[in-house]
Amino acid sequence: MRALRALPTLMHVGVSQAVAYRAEMLVWVLTTTMPLIMLPLWHAVAEEAPIRGFGQSRFTAYFLAAFVVRQVVGAWASWTINYEVRTGALSQRLLRPLHPLWTYATENLASIPMRAAIALPVGVAAFLLTGGAHLVRGPAMWAMIPFALFGAWCITFFAHVTIGALSLWMHQSIKVMDVWSAGFFVFSGYLVPVALFPEWLRDVPAYLPFVYQLGFPVDLLTGALTEGEALRQLGVQWLWVLGLAGLSALVWRRGLRRYGAFGG
Amino acid sequence: MRVARHARLLGTQLKLSLVVAMQYRWDFIIDGVMSVFWTITALVPLYLVFQERPVIAGWRYGEALVVVGWFTLLDGVLKGAINPSLTTVIEHIRSGTLDFVLLKPADAQFLVSTARFAPWRSLSLLAAGAVFAYAFAQIGAPPSPGAVLTSLAMLVAGLTVLYSLWIVVVAVAFRAVRIDNLRYLFEAIFDAARWPASVFKGVVSFLFTFVIPLALMTTYPAEALLGRLTPERFGGALLGAALFAVLARVVWRRSIANYTSASS
């Protein structure tokens, strides 16, 4: 209850921070240009004829949507947690009468308005370049988009918290996060749409969390899914959200006991 | 005399970095595994793409692999020699300790450029070697000695440009101190160098040839190694690299002259 009442204020503080460090934010956005680097390569491939249903315009829609989704589902809590564990700043956060996970969550969520403002022109460009041919249709599908995006954000955030909390055991868990990022790069559809994976690899991403961070929302946005399929994937996505939320709470609570013993 | 002294300084700085690196031997394993992994992520999209088409933007699979080889090599240089120093300089500028560096009786540009190395990253050189071996196994014939020589000249030109761009980035940091994530931006832009330059079209192609000459860093050395670099490109690249070097030196001089230090 207390968390809910504090939420608007925390969000307000977070948004002010995001606005104050807007130059830094812009640089961060510019570091996530991988989809824009992949796009010309796939364009060159699809120059003469489409590949498995992917023509040039569909590639444009896919990778620009991937860029937009990447902006609005981003989180960086593991870095903050690592930093605060190392410097001891975590103690101050623990003194607040609010669970730290709430403050981490609002800090990360608050950057979304700024990031969405940057991503929006890219989305519009994608729409104009493709003539709207690859946009999601139907009210039910549109209704699913906010849930899919929020689910994707939750997976990213809880993964960050889980791995960040590992730093309570091992001093530094940034490298573990690197491993997660590597998995994300390969299996999320960030570099290659999952539909274009080779036969023997195509079923693997469905059993990993990464595709629900990016590939699924992108497929939904670009109208690549039927309603039943979209609903099923949304269900799986939220199972991952619940699982990772539970895991992060557990790791955090266990780790904090050790932290108390550390700082004395 | 001056050269000998700077060479000795370089030796000392390298040794210091090596001593620091030896304290974190676990990083050796993790960095090694990660550099192999990132090399593979650079290869997988290419592998998939060339499953679909034998020739893309004028490049065959084996030939495009040569570009990836140079990319892996330069990426290792970037992350092992350039970025650690960049991080150090930016930290110096922010905390005001750059004054101490400027006071030392050696060229300041030399000192900040060699401030820190990440020796474990030299594993990328091994990865690059493996990529080259695979590439020329695909092509079916080793490069001619002349081609190797011209490609080495191109490598020197590419490294010069990379280093010059880095100096310009540092000059930016002199003005916009808050931006401590510049190195990630640098890495993100460099990511585009993994594809042959002919993949990019229009404005982007112009940008990557003349403004941020990524083409010069990976595509030209690859063309040289394949023995198909035109003399005009060869001359143009050497001239361009020399221009960039002069420009970087001028920019460095000017920003040092305008540097007001953190305390004044």
Image (cartoon, coloured by chain):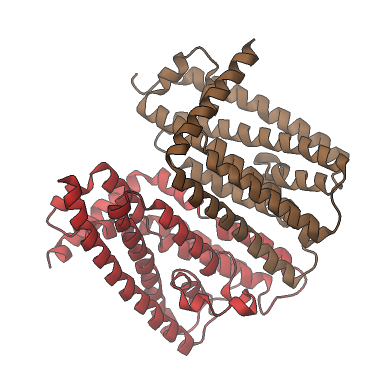
Chain colours: A red, B brown
User: In this rendering, is residue B82 above or below B47?
Assistant: above
* Residue at screen point 37% across, 55% down: A76
For this orientation, the residue located farthest to the bottom is A228
Residue B184 image offset from top left, x and y in percent: 50, 46
Find residue B253 and report its image quarter. top right
Q: Quadrant of the N terminus of chain B?
A: top right
Tell me if residue B228 can be seen: yes
Foreground of the two, A262 or A90: A262
Q: Quadrant of the C terminus of chain B?
A: top left
* Residue at screen point 42% across, 23% down: B98
* Residue at screen point 45% across, 49% down: A28
User: In this rendering, is residue B258 above or below B42?
Assistant: above
Tell me if residue A123 can be seen: no
Find residue A3 and report its image quarter. bottom left
Foreground of the two, B158 or A257: A257
Foreground of the two, B181 or B19: B19
* Residue at screen point 48% across, 52% down: B30
Q: Is residue B150 left or right of residue A235?
A: right
For this orientation, the residue located farthest to the top is B1
Q: Is residue A51 left or right of residue B166?
A: right
Foreground of the two, B240 or B122: B122
